[in-house]
């Protein structure tokens, strides 16, 4: 003759599992943890199987499964692995939304945006991948409408400009900033101006321009890092290492204007943001170097 199974009152079950009496009673009424028997006084009694079911219900509820889904798993109407996979997909979508929201809030905190700008940033970040790509496509189409193909237009069309399937926080924030940038009419106008300008000064080959760029990076970069005034005698000495010391004033000013047509901090930022979206190594900003060079060129040399 076997011993009768051990039975527990709802209070004993609560104390042994840490689940409140109220919750156990609710799950019991829902059919998830049915009592094995009742006492002579009508109180519910639970066996060891109920303890195991209660533990599983608590685990599944802790993972975010609703009561109906938990019931189907307990009744073997649904496989736990299949349900888990569905919830993984749902959690992934929720995580992406939370990352987007965090990016918007960081943008607002950093830029002190107005309510309208905040709403716009949230709307832009919440778009689908196709809708996000369409924003960039529209920007490129509007900016270069009616123009012959140029290197900058071809580069902007070619580079992927939307978030990857599983973006990092940095990539989401880059997209939010990029979306705001390409929505600015003044930015579109500036890019169009750069596209319509000649690619290089007429008397300079690509090889010579590359050489000068290396000189600018070396000497103007050092001047900017050291905080040297481009109009100072020391600044002019550094300038003479980049351009010929006897370059006529008219040519100095023309070169400064040429550099000004192609140097723009927002355009440079566009490419930095694109690099983040495409997992490319970051590159340091060059705009301060060219600003320094332009200021030095526009300083009247001492005769």
Image (cartoon, helix red, strand yellow):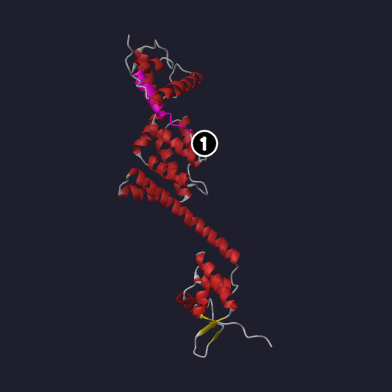
Residue 89 placement (x, y as % from top left): 53, 58
Residue 130 placement (x, y as % from top left): 48, 48
Instruction: Answer whether residue 144 is visible to the viewer in this image.
Output: no
The region drawn magenta spans 283-298
Vertical placement of residue 25 versus 261, above or below:
below
Q: Is residue 223 left or right of residue 160?
A: left
Residue 285 among magenta residues: yes
Q: Is residue 210 left or right of residue 235?
A: right
> Quick one: 17 or 263, which is closer to the camera?
17
Task: Farthest residue to the bottom: give it.
Answer: 40
> Quick one: 151 or 177, which is closer to the camera?
177
Residue at 51% x, 78% y: name it: 12
Instruction: Answer whether residue 237 is visible to the viewer in this image.
Output: yes
Residue at 44% x, 20% y: name it: 219
**Residue 301, located in which quarter of the rendered image?**
top left
Q: Magenta region's main secondary structure?
A: helix
Quarter of the image with the C terminus is: top left
Quarter of the image with the N terminus is: bottom right
Report the residue marked by disc 1.
281
Residue 248 placement (x, y as % from top left): 37, 11
Residue at 36% x, 34% y: name it: 189
> Quick one: 192 or 279, which is closer to the camera?
279
Residue 61 placement (x, y as % from top left): 51, 68
CA neighbours of label 1 inside 10 A, class few (<14), some (14 to 19), many (20+):
few
């Amino acid at each position: 003759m076997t011993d009768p199974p051990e039975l527990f009152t709802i209070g004993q079950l609560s104390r042994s599992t840490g689940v409140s009496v109220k919750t156990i009673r609710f799950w019991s009424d829902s059919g998830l943890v049915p009592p094995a028997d009742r006492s002579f006084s009508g109180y519910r009694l639970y066996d060891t199987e109920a303890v195991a079911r209660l533990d599983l219900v608590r685990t599944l509820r802790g993972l975010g499964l609703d009561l109906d889904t938990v019931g189907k798993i307990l009744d073997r109407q649904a496989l736990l692995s299949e349900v888990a996979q569905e919830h993984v997909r749902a959690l992934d979508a929720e995580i992406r939304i939370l990352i987007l929201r965090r990016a918007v809030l960081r943008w607002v905190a950093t830029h002190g945006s107005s309510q309208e700008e905040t709403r716009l940033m949230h709307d832009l970040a919440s778009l689908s991948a196709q809708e996000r790509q369409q924003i960039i496509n529209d920007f490129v189409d509007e900016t270069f409408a009616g123009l012959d193909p140029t290197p900058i237009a071809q580069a902007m069309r070619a580079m992927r400009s939307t978030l990857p399937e599983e973006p990092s926080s940095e990539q989401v924030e880059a997209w939010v900033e990029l979306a705001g940038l390409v929505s600015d009419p003044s930015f579109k106008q500036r890019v169009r101006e750069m596209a319509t300008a000649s690619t290089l000064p007429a008397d300079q080959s690509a090889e010579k321009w590359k050489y000068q760029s290396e000189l600018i990076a070396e000497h103007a970069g050092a001047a900017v890092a050291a905080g040297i005034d481009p109009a100072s005698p020391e600044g002019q000495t550094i300038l003479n290492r980049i351009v010929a010391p006897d370059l006529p004033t008219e040519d100095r000013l023309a070169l400064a204007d040429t550099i000004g047509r192609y140097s723009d901090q927002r355009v440079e930022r566009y490419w930095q943001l694109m690099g983040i979206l495409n997992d490319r190594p970051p590159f340091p900003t060059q705009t301060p170097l060219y600003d320094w060079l332009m200021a030095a060129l526009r300083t009247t040399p001492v005769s």
